[in-house]
Amino acid sequence: MLRSELIAKLSEESPDLKTREVERIVDTIFEEITSAMERGDRVELRGFGAFSVRKRDARTGRNPRTGAPVRVGAKHVPFFKAGKELRARLNGGEDPEDRHN
């Protein structure tokens, strides 16, 4: 789903709000999630999942074209972990982590 599709869907479901207002709400939500992650905070949306930031250490990678070693610096990357309810919906009502072998 694209951002524009999300805004259109929310506008459709909330006819009392103007599209510009819905767009501002969506932008504010994304900006707040981004700002929290910039600060190193974890953002949890119950039933959906949690966004966090993970640190990747510096490493030696490979140039895919030449195979030559390339130094890749340390960096922070966004990470998303799906919530239990989301995993259950994606797996037909069954949470794969609840399975017993």
Image (tube, grey):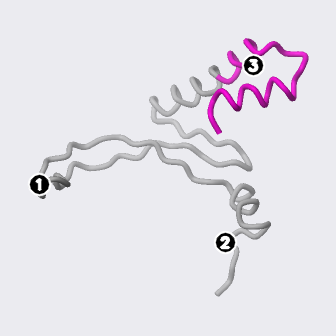
- Residue 96's disc is 2
Q: Quadrant of residue 62?
A: bottom left
Residues drawn in magenta: 1-26
Is tag 3's residue or tag 1's residue first in the polypeptide sequence?
3
Vertical arrangement, residue 18 with respect to residue 76, above or below: above
Q: How many marks?
A: 3
Vertical arrangement, residue 76 with respect to residue 63, above or below: above
Q: Residue at x 25, y 43 (%)?
A: 74
Q: How dense is the environment of label 2, judged by Cα within 10 Å: few (below 14), some, or many (20 and up)?
A: few
Query: In the rendered image, which residue does mark 3 sit on?
Result: 22
Q: Residue furthest front?
A: 65
Residue 30 position, x and y percent, is: 60, 27
Q: Residue furthest bottom?
A: 101
Q: Magenta region, mostly helix, strand or loop?
A: helix
Q: Quadrant of residue 20?
A: top right
Query: In the rendered image, which residue does mark 1 sit on?
Result: 66
Q: Quadrant of the N terminus?
A: top right
